[in-house]
Structure formats: C-alpha cells, structure tokens
Image (cartoon, grey):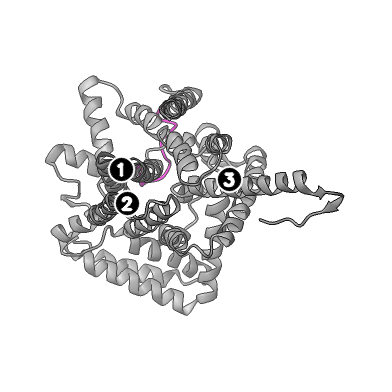
Amino acid sequence: MNSQNKENRWILFLLFAGGVAIHLLYLVALGLPESLERLQWAHADTETYVIPAQSFLRSGVFAVQGAPDSFRTIGYPLFLSGALKLGKMTGLDWRMIVYVVQAIFFALAYPAIYYLGRRVFRVSRGLSLGCVGFTVLSGAFISYTSVIMSDAIFATSLIVGMACGFCALRNRSIWWGLVHVAVITYAATVRPILAFYPFAAVCMHWAYLKENSDSADRFARRLMVAMFLVALIGVQVPAIRNWINYRVFTPSENGSAVLFDYLAKDVLEMKNQIPRYEQVKAQLLKMSDHRMLGERIAVRRKEALGVFRDYPLETAAFVLFNGIFNSLDMHWNNTFFYRLRVTWCRDYIDGSVRWSPLPFAVAMLFVIVYGCVYSASIILAFTLRKNLWVVCSVFLLLLPYIFCLTSCQGARFRLWFEPLLVLAAAVTIQKACRIWTFYRDNRFKNGTLIALQI
C-alpha cells in the first residue's frame, strides 16, 4: 500500500512538473518577453482587474474611483497586486511575473484532474492520464497563461479545491479539509458563482462516503459537515464585503449587468429597440454613486426581465446560440487571437483581427471532439439518474452556468467545469470498453450465444 501511495505521489508530481514545463514553453513560443505588448487583451476587461489592484497597493482598498469596487470581486486583483508589488521591488515587468506565476499555478489542474479521475470517478490510470492529455491538447489552461483575466485562476482553484475535499475525506485529514475550504473560498473571491457550491459539495461528499462504505464513519461525517459549514461562510465573502460597504448582500454588481448589458441589449438590437436600452443607460448614469448599488441592480434586473418578457422567442434564441457557442468553442482561439491576430468565427469591426481558414478548420475539429465528449457525458447522466445525491450535486454545481448563457464569450466560460465533463466522458468510455470485453470473451459458450448482462 505504501509503495502504491508513493507511486501515485510521483505521478502527481510529474504531472505538475510537466504542466509547468509545457506552460512555460508555450510562453516562450509566443515570443515572451519581447511580445508583452502584443499579448494584452484588446478589450477593457484587463483594466477592470488592474485598477482595483493598483488602488489596493496605494490605499489598502480594492477601489474604483475612490470607492470599494462592487463590480469585480477581490480575488484576481489581489493576485495582480502581488505581481505589481513584486515587479516594483525587482524591476521586472509585472505582466511577465503574472504570466510566469500563472503558468506554474495553472499546472496544478493536471494532478487534480488525475486524482479526481482515479479516486472519485474510478477510471483506470490510463484513462485518467488520457483525461490530462486531452486537457493539454485542448489548450485548456495552457492558452490562458498569457491572458490577464480571471477565468483560468478560478477554474484551477475550483478543481484543486474539489480534489482537496475528497483527499480530506479519503485520508480523514483535518489539514486537507482546511486546504479545501481555503482554496474554495479563494475561488469564490475570484468569480462570484459559487454560492451553491457547498450544497453541491456535501451531496457529492456524501455519495462518495456511501460508495466507499464509509458512511458510518463518524469522523468522516463530522469532517464532511464541518467542511460544508465553513465553506458555506467562505463562499459568501464577496457578498459580505458588499453588505459591509453598501448594505447590499450580493457578491457582485456584474450579475445584473450581464443580464441587461449583454443578453437584453442583444435582444433589443435585434428588434431595433436600442433607444430603449439607451434610455435605461441614461437612468443608470444618474445613479452612478457607489452608494446606489442596490438601486442600480434593481433597475437592471427589472428592465432585463421586461425585455425577456416582451421578446421571449428572441431571448430563447440568443440563450440557445450562446450556450452552443460557449460549449463548443476551442480554447486555442486565444493563441490564434494573440499570436496571429486571426480567429475562426468572424472579422473584428475595427479590422484588428481577421477570420482565417486555419483556425476555422481547427475549430471544426474540436466541435466534433466536444460533441463526442458531451454525448458520452449525457450517456453517463442517464445511467446515474437513480443516484439522487450525485444528480443533486451535478445540478447544483452546474446551476451557475445559466449566467454563462447571457453572452457569447467562448470557451473560457465553461473552463471551470470542463475537466469534470471530460472525466465523466472517460467513465462512459471505460464502461463501454468493459461491455465490449465482456461480449468478446463470452459471446459464445458451448456453441450458444449468451445474453449480455450489465
């Protein structure tokens, strides 16, 4: 048993070390550090993280225009503030520090995926390694090392935190339980969509204990409950922060913004009703005072729901399109975008990025691949429909993806649950292989075709 544990630890270390090497080689292939300017995101999202980070270094508050930021949570700006501080101390470009640290941190996802595959999804070593290999080939995590946005650091924190939670239960370890809670809490401060995660976690943890015949273990049950209760508080940190500052218990103003400024705006543009959108924007401009956070959220939510109610078919069409696009888009689009200034879907209006047949061909290949992955995962879902705890866990875990259907943002929107999707597909592949092996070895017995029983 000890030799097996030692071997598993070596595999986890090698996966991490290999991931770091691949990520750093990717940065070199992009031409870093010479091409720092070219790698900056072309939109304003990066600045919305950098500004509160700079404010934190000056005043100790993650502020925008002198008031605590209610739009971005503090997790990623906290990380950037460390890079800014280290860059000032060492004389290095802070962006280069961000890229290198992200390359190292994102590599933690690979041992976490392998661990979940072996200990939770119960797939073979080969298939677990295959899931890691697929994650590498798909560009997930690799392609985000050169992006100063929060998507990959959130996804890495979430998948690592999940692995730590199961490790705590497996080893009856309070230490790993504390790490689980700390990492999940940090993930919640990076992206505020984990309000339901503790409920999803306690369902999956209970299913795990029952599956391992450990549901009668009092210490394991108490540890599970303790992790649930502490995580339940931890994931509310962003909402608590806004309550302290503005007396509004919401993790971020961004939730109402994506409903109105993205989905509702797209619908109004389709219906040639932009004056209606601009009228609400003018009203919101008069409510720009940070203390009117609750009022702004209420207006955006009310107006967005009004648009959805007036144009239900158009809204459903955009939700469906966004869902399909975000679910099938390839992660490597980041590389085509940053390095070659081309993309697979369309020309940019300003001409800065052009459509090209090469990324289009690669994208179509991944559409087919992800179609197979989703199909295999759906097959598994049908086989698990009688396991109520697992079904509840999956539902609660994926519930926040509803917000990811509001705009066409691509593969980054699904990055946080894609490793679990790939592992689920691996379970179906393993079951199919076992069925085929059983059929091959037992199809004839005494000259008679036997019935296949699964």
**Depicted 102 relative to depicted 283: above or below:** above
User: Where's residue 15, x and y in %?
Assistant: 46, 28
**Depicted 151 relative to depicted 20: above or below:** below
* Residue 172's disc number: 1
CA gap, disc 3 to disc 1?
Answer: 27 Å
| Residue to which mark 2 is pinned | 217
Q: Quadrant of the N terminus?
A: top left
* Residue at 44% from the left image edge and 38% from the top image edge: 115
Q: Earlier in the sequence, mark 2 or mark 1?
A: 1
* Residue at 23% from the left image edge and 44% from the top image edge: 52
185 magenta-colored: no
248 and 223: which is toward the camera: 223
CA gap, disc 2 to disc 3?
Answer: 30 Å
What's under tag 2, amino acid-wise? Asp
| Residue to which mark 3 is pinned | 426
Q: At numbered mark 3, what does the secondary structure look like: helix, strand or loop?
A: helix
Q: Earlier in the sequence, mark 3 or mark 1?
A: 1
Whether tag 3 and tag 1 are in contact, CB under 8 A, the answer is no
Q: Is residue 17 left or right of residue 332?
A: left
User: Where's residue 198, x and y in %?
Assistant: 32, 56
* Residue at 24% from the left image edge and 53% from the top image edge: 226
User: Where's residue 120, x and y in %?
Assistant: 46, 46
| Residue farthest to the front, as pictured | 446
Query: Does any portion of residue 80 appear in the rendered image?
Result: yes
Query: Does any portion of residue 287 appear in the rendered image?
Result: no
Magenta-tinted stretch: 36-47
Q: Quadrant of the C terminus?
A: bottom right
What's under tag 1, amino acid-wise? Arg
Whether tag 2 and tag 1 are in contact, CB under 8 A, the answer is yes
Q: At numbered mark 2, what does the secondary structure look like: helix, strand or loop?
A: loop
